[in-house]
C-alpha cells in the first residue's frame, strides 16, 4: 500500500487499480473525437459577438468561397427539427438556429462543414453577422435583469426550506451575524474539448460525443430530430473530464447531425476552448445574505439564508443550495429564500456539487464568523450545534459522522497547535493561517439496469450504460462483480458509455456508485442463486450441502464447511456455457413508473432530503493552512487535510483520488477560478486556460485524505454514499477562514486574490 | 486559420532578402505580410485567433548560423543567440552563476513545454495578452488602429499602470525583457539596410497614439543576438515575480533588481518592473533614489514610491500600484541579502 492506495479500514474495499489506467496513461483510450471515422468532414462553429439582439443578416459568401467548404448550416436549416428543451437532459431551450434572436454572447450562428478542420475554422471566422443590437444585462447589478423566486421553478427545488419562527429568534439572539457573500461564474474547462461526431447509416444515427447521460441524450436527440429513439445511438466510452458539463446535451449535437445528413457524410465538430464558454453551461454566479443568531453558549437559534443566482433569459436553472445549508446544523429556526436573476447570458448548468459548493461556502464562512464573534473555537462551535435530527423535516440522518471527521482531521492536521489570535502565527516573512470547514453532499440513487455474464471459465462481462467520467465507476462496477462472483479483476471486463447498453441514470449527483453497483450486485446475485441451486442440486458437485451457506471464491463455489466445487464443474453439471442476468435496480421509494422512465432517459433521484424515513448525506471536515507573504500578499496553500465518511467505500484508491481532486478544485475555487464578464457587453473575456486560472502542480503541496469508516444500511443495497462531489464542498470556506486567521481580513467574495489583501 | 506560405530560409542573409520589400520599412513587423516565426508559441497562437494575419512565414529554425543557437559567456558579457531556447538559457549554470536575474526571469516564465519551444528573440517580441486584443470582435487600437480600446473601461485587472496612453493600456507581459532592460542589454539587428546594435531599452515603444507600433524594428529586420554586459552588480541580482498562482502565470507585478553595494550602501542599483507597464520598464527614479543610500526598508520604500509616482490606475488594476511597490521593496531587500 502507498499513499495513493490507502489500506482499507472497516467497510472499505481494496484499492484495486483502475481497469483503464494503462490505456489512459499510454494514450490508447479512444475519446469520442479520436474514433477513426471514414470519410469524415469537419465542422466549425461561428458564434455571436453580441449578447442581446437579433441577427438581421448573416454574410456567408466569403466563407463559402473558402476551398474545401462543403456546407453551412444556419438559420432556416433546423426548421424541420424540434427546438431543444431545457431540463435534465437539455442544457437550454435556446434553439440558436431556430430563431434569429440572440440570447447571449457566443451563441451559435452557423456551423461550417469542410473537407479539413483548417478550412472549416477559416471559413467560420469569415462569417459575419449584422445585428440589431440591444443593450444587454450582464449580471446582478445590471439594469434590465428580471428577478423571480426560484421555488417551484425546478422540479428539484420545490420550496424554500423553513422551520420555526425565524423573526422572533433573530430578534432575541444575543450574538448576530448579518453578512453577504458571493461566488463567481466558473466554467468547467475539462481538458477534453467538447465535440460531436455524427454518422448516419440510412435512418440510423450514431453520435460519438462525450456524455454523462447517453440514454437521456438518445431520447432527447430523437425528439429533436423526429426519429425513433431506437434509431439513435450515443457512444461515449471515455470522457476526459466532465464535472457536469457533459450532463445536459447542448444544441450543437442536433446541428451536427443535421449537417451530416445534408452532406451525406459523417461530420465531426470539435469546439475550441474559447467557444466552449458560450456554447456550454457554467456554474452560475451567486450572492448570499446570511443572518445567524446565537446564544452566548454557542447554540445557534436563528439561521437565515437568502440567495440570488444568475440564469439566462428563457431558462430557470436553479442552483438552490439552501436544501443542504438548512439541514446542516441544529439551528432552532430557519428562513431561506432563493431568487433567480434572469440576464442576457447562456443558461448555466451543473458543475461539481452544483448547489453545495456556493451555498455551503456562504454558510461555512458565516459559521467561522460566528465562532469568532462568540470567541469560540470553530470546531467546538460546530460540535455544539451538531443536530440529532435535521431541522426542517425533523427526520433522522441515515448516518452522520461529521464530528468523527472533525476529530480525525483536526488530529492529523495538528489543529491544537493553532494560536487563535489573528496574525499570531508567522514563519519568517510569511503569515500563517489555519482554518476549517464542513463538507456535505446529499446521498442519492436512481434506477439503473445492468447485464452481467459469467462464463464457465470464469470470465465476467459487465454491461451498463453508465459513464466513466474519470471517477473510476468502470473499475468499481467490475470490482463489485468480481467480489460477488468470486473471480479476479483480471477476469472482468466492463462496458459502459453506450446507449445500446442497459440504461443507467445520468452520471451526476454522485449517484453512480450507488445506482450502478446496486444493479450490478442484483444481477450478480441472480447468477449466484442459479449457480448455488445447481451446485447443491442432486448429483451436482456439492450435492447435499443443502442449507449450508454457499459462496463464490477463486472461481469455486465454496461451502461454509470448506467443501468446494470448481466453477467449470458446476457449469458442466448445468450443461451451460455461460450465465447471463439482466437486472433492474430501483431505490426504495421509487415511483411505479421509475424504471419505465429510465428507458425514456429520465432519472428519478431518491435520497438526500427527499426520503420519508431519513435524510441521507455524506459529510467531511477540511483543514487548511495558508501562507501569505507579508510584503506581497500572495496566498499559498502548503497543506490541506480532509476526513470524509461516505458509507461503504468501494475502492480506497479511487475514493481518495476523487476526494483529493475535489479538495484541489476547492483550493482553485478559493484562490483562482473565475470567468470574467465584461459588464458592459455581457461577454466573457478570459476564455482560455492561460487566463482562466486553475491551480497548477506547483500550487498544490500536501493533500491528505482520511477515509473515516462508516456503515449505513439505509442508503441503498450497496451501502454506498456518493463522494465524487464531496471533496470540493467547504474547501473555499476553509481557505477563507485561514486567510482571516492570518490577516484579519474577512474576504467574502470569491476568488480571494492578492487584490483583496493589499493596500 | 488563414492559409499562408511557409518557407525555410537557410541563412540570415537569405531570410532578410526574403523578407525585404519596399513596404517593409513602413509597416510594423506585426502588420507585415511576411513575418518571421521562431518557436511559434506567440505567433501561431495569434494566427489561430485571427489577430496575426501573415500571408507568408519565414521559419527561422532552419537558419544555419551556429551563433544563433549559442550562449557565449566571457569576462564581461553574456551573449545569447536569438534562437537559443528559453529553457536552455534558464538552465544554463554559468548564466545562473554569473547573473541570476537572467536565469530566474526565464525560469519563472511560461511552462516547461513552452520554454523548450520558445526562442529568446521571439520571447522579447512577444505581444500582449490583453484579452480584448486577443479576440477580434472587440475594438482595439493595437490590433485595429482607431477602433478604440475596449479595455479602458472594461475588464482591466491585468492591464498596465505605467507607460499607458489614452489609446492603449496593454501590459507588456514578458519577464526576460525586464532583466535585459535593467542590465543595459543590447540587441543585434540585421536587415537589408545593414546591421545595427540597439540599446534594449530602445527596442520597445510605448503605445502613445500608435499602439500598433510596438518596436523599433522594421518588418525585414531580424534580431540575431542579445548581449548583456556583466559587471559588479550582475551576481547580486534577482528576479521576483508575483502572480496569481505559483507557476505558469504572467506577472501581476515583478521586479528585476541588480545591486552594486559598498557595504550597506548602494553604489548603484539597476531596477526594472514587470507586469505593471506597457513596455519593459526601467525604474530610473527608483535607482536614483537609492544611490548612495543605506539600503534599509525605508530606503527601499522611498525608491518604490518614486518608481510608481506617475502610475495611472484604471477601475480593476489599482491594486497593482501598492503591489508593485511592495514587490520592489521585497526584491530590493532580498537582493541586498544575497552574497555579492
Ligand atoms: C500560455 C503561455 C504562457 C506564457 N507565460 C509567459 C510568462 O510567464 N512569461 C513570459 O515572459 N512569457 C510567457 N509566455 C510567452 C512566451 O515566452 C513567448 O510566447 C515566447 O517566448 C515567444 O517565443 P517564440 O520563439 O515562440 O516566438 P514566436 O511566436 O515564434 O514569435 C514571436 C514574435 O517574434 C517575432 N520573431 C521571433 N524571432 C524573431 C527574430 N529573431 N527576429 C525578429 N523577429 C522575431 C515573430 O515574427 C513574432 O512576431 C507565455 C506564452 C504562453 C502561450
Ligand atoms: S489595452 Fe491596448 S491592446 Fe488592449 S484593447 Fe486597448 S488598445 Fe487593444
Image (cartoon, coloured by chain):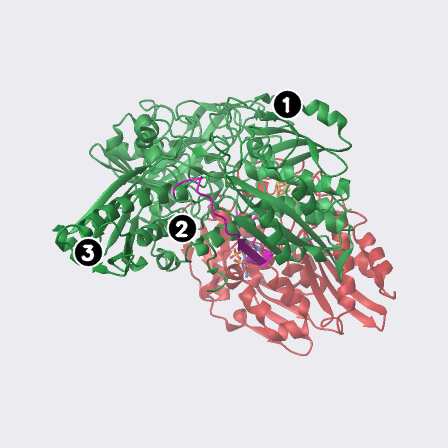
Viewer-nearest residue: B180 or B300: B300
Viewer-nearest residue: B210 or A500: A500
Disc 2, SS: loop
Taking the image as four quarters, which one is ligand 2 found in?
A: top right
- Label 1: few (<14), some or many (≥20) within 10 Å? few
Spot occupied by residue A43 in the image (x, y as percentages of width and height): 36, 39
Seen in the picture, residue A623 relative to A323 is either above or below; the reply is below
A705 on left or right of B339? left
Disc 1, SS: loop
- Chain appearing in green on the rendered image: A
Spot occupied by residue A276 in the image (x, y as percentages of width and height): 47, 39
Is mark 2 in CB contact (under 8 Å) with mark 3? no
Q: Which residue is mark 2?
A: A472
Viewer-nearest residue: B142 or A310: A310
Q: Chain of mark 2?
A: A
User: Range of the magenta residues?
Assistant: A689-717
Residue A143: mark in rendering: 1
Q: Which residue is mark 3?
A: A542
Q: Distance of mark 3 from mark 1, alpha carbons?
A: 79 Å
**In the image, residue A715 lies in the stretch drawn in magenta:** yes
Query: Does residue A329 show up?
Result: yes
Front disc: 3 or 1: 3
Seen in the picture, residue B135 relative to A310 is either above or below; the reply is below
Amino acid at each position: 500500500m502507498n499513499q495513493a492506495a490507502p489500506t482499507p479500514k472497516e467497510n472499505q474495499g481494496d484499492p484495486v487499480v483502475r481497469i483503464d489506467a494503462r490505456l489512459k496513461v499510454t494514450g490508447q483510450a479512444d475519446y469520442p473525437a479520436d474514433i477513426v471515422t471514414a470519410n469524415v468532414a469537419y465542422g466549425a462553429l461561428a458564434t455571436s459577438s453580441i449578447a442581446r439582439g437579433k441577427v438581421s443578416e448573416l454574410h456567408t459568401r466569403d466563407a463559402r468561397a473558402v476551398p474545401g467548404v462543403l456546407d453551412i448550416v444556419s438559420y432556416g436549416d433546423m426548421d424541420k427539427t424540434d427546438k431543444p428543451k431545457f431540463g435534465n437532459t437539455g442544457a437550454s431551450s435556446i434553439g440558436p438556429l431556430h430563431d434569429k434572436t440572440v440570447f447571449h454572447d457566443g451563441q451559435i450562428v452557423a456551423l461550417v462543414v469542410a473537407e479539413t478542420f483548417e478550412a472549416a475554422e477559416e471559413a467560420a471566422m469569415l462569417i459575419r453577422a449584422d445585428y440589431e443590437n440591444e443593450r444587454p444585462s450582464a449580471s446582478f447589478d445590471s439594469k434590465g435583469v428580471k428577478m423571480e423566486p426560484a421555488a417551484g421553478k425546478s422540479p428539484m427545488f420545490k420550496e424554500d426550506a423553513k422551520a420555526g419562527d425565524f423573526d422572533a429568534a433573530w430578534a432575541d439572539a444575543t450574538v448576530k451575524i448579518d453578512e453577504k457573500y458571493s461566488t463567481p461564474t466558473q466554467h468547467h474547462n475539462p481538458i477534453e474539448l467538447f465535440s460531436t461526431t455524427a454518422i448516419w447509416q440510412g435512418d440510423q444515427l450514431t453520435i460519438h460525443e462525450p456524455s454523462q447521460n447517453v440514454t437521456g441524450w438518445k431520447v432527447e436527440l430523437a425528439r429533436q430530430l423526429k426519429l425513433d429513439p431506437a434509431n439513435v445511438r450515443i457512444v461515449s466510452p471515455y470522457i476526459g473530464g466532465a464535472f457536469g458539463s457533459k450532463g445536459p446535451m447542448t444544441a450543437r449535437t442536433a446541428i451536427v447531425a443535421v449537417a451530416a445528413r445534408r452532406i451525406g457524410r459523417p461530420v465531426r465538430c470539435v469546439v475550441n476552448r474559447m467557444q466552449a464558454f458560450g456554447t456550454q453551461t457554467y456554474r452560475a454566479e451567486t450572492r448570499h445574505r446570511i443572518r445567524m443568531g446565537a446564544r452566548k453558549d454557542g447554540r445557534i437559534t436563528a439561521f437565515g439564508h437568502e440567495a440570488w443566482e444568475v440564469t439566462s433569459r428563457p431558462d430557470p436553472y436553479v442552483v438552490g443550495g439552501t436544501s443542504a445549508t438548512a439541514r446542516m446544523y441544529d439551528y432552532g429556526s430557519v428562513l431561506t429564500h432563493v431568487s433567480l436573476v434572469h440576464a442576457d447570458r447562456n443558461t448555466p448548468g451543473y458543475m461539481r456539487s452544483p448547489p453545495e459548493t456556493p451555498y455551503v461556502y456562504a454558510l461555512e464562512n458565516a459559521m467561522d464568523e460566528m465562532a469568532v464573534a462568540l470567541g469560540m473555537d470553530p470546531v467546538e462551535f460546530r460540535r455544539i450545534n451538531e443536530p440529532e435530527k435535521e431541522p426542517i423535516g425533523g427526520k433522522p440522518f441515515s448516518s452522520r459522522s461529521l464530528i468523527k471527521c472533525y476529530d480525525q482531521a483536526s488530529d492529523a492536521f495538528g489543529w491544537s497547535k493553532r494560536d487563535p489570535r489573528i496574525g499570531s502565527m508567522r514563519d519568517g516573512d510569511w503569515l500563517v493561517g489555519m482554518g476549517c470547514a464542513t463538507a456535505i453532499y446529499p446521498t442519492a440513487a436512481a434506477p439503473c439496469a445492468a447485464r452481467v455474464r459469467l462464463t464457465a471459465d470464469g470470465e465476467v462481462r459487465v454491461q451498463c450504460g453508465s459513464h466513466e467520467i474519470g471517477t473510476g465507476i468502470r473499475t468499481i462496477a467490475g470490482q463489485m462483480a468480481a467480489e460477488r462472483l468470486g473471480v479476479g479483476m483480471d477476469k472482468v471486463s466492463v462496458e459502459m458509455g453506450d446507449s445500446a447498453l442497459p440504461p443507467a441514470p445520468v452520471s451526476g449527483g454522485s449517484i453512480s456508485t450507488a445506482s450502478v453497483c446496486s444493479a450490478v450486485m442484483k444481477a450478480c446475485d441472480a447468477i449466484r442463486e442459479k449457480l448455488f441451486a445447481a451446485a447443491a442440486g442432486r448429483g451436482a458437485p456439492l450435492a447435499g450441502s443443502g442449507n449450508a451457506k454457499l459462496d463464490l471464491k477463486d472461481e469455486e463455489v465454496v461451502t461454509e464447511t470448506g467443501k468446494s466445487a470448481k466453477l467449470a464443474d458446476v457449469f458442466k453439471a448445468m450443461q451451460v456455457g455461460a450465465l447471463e442476468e439482466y437486472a433492474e435496480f430501483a431505490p426504495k421509494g421509487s415511483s411505479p413508473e421509475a424504471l419505465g422512465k429510465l428507458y425514456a432517459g429520465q432519472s428519478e433521484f431518491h435520497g438526500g432530503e427527499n426520503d420519508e424515513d431519513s435524510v441521507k448525506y455524506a459529510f467531511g471536515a477540511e483543514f487548511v493552512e495558508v501562507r501569505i507573504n507579508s510584503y506581497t500578499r500572495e496566498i499559498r496553500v502548503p497543506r490541506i487535510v480532509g476526513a470524509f465518511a461516505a458509507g461503504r467505500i468501494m475502492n480506497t484508491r479511487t475514493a481518495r483520488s476523487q476526494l483529493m481532486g475535489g479538495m484541489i478544485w476547492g483550493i482553485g475555487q478559493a484562490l483562482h477560478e473565475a470567468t470574467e464578464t465584461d459588464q458592459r457587453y455581457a461577454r466573457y473575456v478570459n476564455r482560455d486556460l492561460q487566463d482562466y486560472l486553475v491551480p497548477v502542480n506547483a500550487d498544490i503541496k500536501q493533500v491528505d485524505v482520511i477515509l473515516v469508516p462508516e456503515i449505513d444500511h439505509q442508503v441503498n443495497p450497496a451501502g454506498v454514499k456518493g463522494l465524487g462531489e464531496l471533496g470540493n464542498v467547504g474547501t473555499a470556506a476553509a481557505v477563507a477562514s485561514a486567510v482571516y486567521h492570518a490577516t484579519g481580513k474577512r474576504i467574502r467574495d470569491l476568488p480571494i486574490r492578492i487584490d483583496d489583501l493589499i493596500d | 486559420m488563414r492559409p499562408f506560405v511557409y518557407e525555410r530560409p537557410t541563412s540570415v542573409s537569405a531570410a532578410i532578402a526574403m523578407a525585404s520589400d519596399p513596404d517593409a520599412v513602413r509597416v510594423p513587423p506585426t502588420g507585415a505580410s511576411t513575418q518571421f516565426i521562431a518557436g511559434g508559441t506567440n505567433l501561431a497562437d495569434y494566427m489561430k485567433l485571427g489577430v496575426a494575419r501573415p500571408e507568408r512565414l519565414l521559419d527561422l529554425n532552419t537558419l544555419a548560423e551556429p551563433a544563433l543557437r549559442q550562449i557565449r559567456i566571457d569576462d564581461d558579457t553574456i551573449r545569447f543567440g536569438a534562437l537559443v531556447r528559453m529553457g536552455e538559457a534558464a538552465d544554463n549554470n554559468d548564466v545562473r552563476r554569473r547573473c541570476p536575474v537572467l536565469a530566474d526571469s526565464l525560469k519563472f516564465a511560461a511552462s516547461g513545454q513552452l520554454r523548450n519551444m520558445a526562442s529568446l528573440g521571439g520571447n522579447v517580441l512577444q505581444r500582449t495578452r490583453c484579452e480584448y486584443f486577443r479576440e477580434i470582435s472587440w475594438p482595439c487600437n493595437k490590433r485595429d488602429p482607431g477602433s478604440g480600446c475596449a479595455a479602458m473601461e472594461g475588464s482591466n485587472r491585468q492591464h498596465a499602470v505605467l507607460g499607458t496612453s489614452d489609446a492603449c493600456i496593454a501590459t507588456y507581459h514578458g519577464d526576460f525583457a525586464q532583466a535585459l532592460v535593467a542590465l543595459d542589454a543590447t540587441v543585434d539587428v540585421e536587415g537589408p539596410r545593414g546591421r545595427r546594435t540597439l540599446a534594449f531599452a530602445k527596442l520597445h515603444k510605448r503605445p502613445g497614439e500608435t499602439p500598433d507600433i510596438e518596436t523599433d524594428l522594421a518588418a525585414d529586420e531580424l534580431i540575431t543576438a542579445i548581449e548583456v554586459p556583466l559587471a559588479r552588480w550582475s551576481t547580486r541580482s534577482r528576479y521576483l515575480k508575483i502572480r496569481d498562482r505559483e507557476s505558469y502565470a504572467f506577472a501581476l507585478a515583478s521586479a528585476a533588481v541588480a545591486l552594486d553595494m559598498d557595504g550597506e550602501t548602494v553604489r548603484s542599483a539597476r531596477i526594472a518592473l514587470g507586469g505593471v507597464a506597457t513596455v519593459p520598464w526601467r525604474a530610473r527614479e527608483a535607482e536614483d533614489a537609492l544611490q548612495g543610500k543605506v539600503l534599509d526598508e525605508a530606503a527601499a520604500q522611498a525608491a518604490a514610491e518614486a518608481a510608481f509616482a506617475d502610475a495611472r490606475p484604471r477601475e480593476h488594476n489599482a491594486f497593482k500600484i501598492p503591489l508593485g511597490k511592495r514587490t520592489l521593496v521585497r526584491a530590493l531587500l532580498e537582493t541586498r541579502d544575497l552574497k555579492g
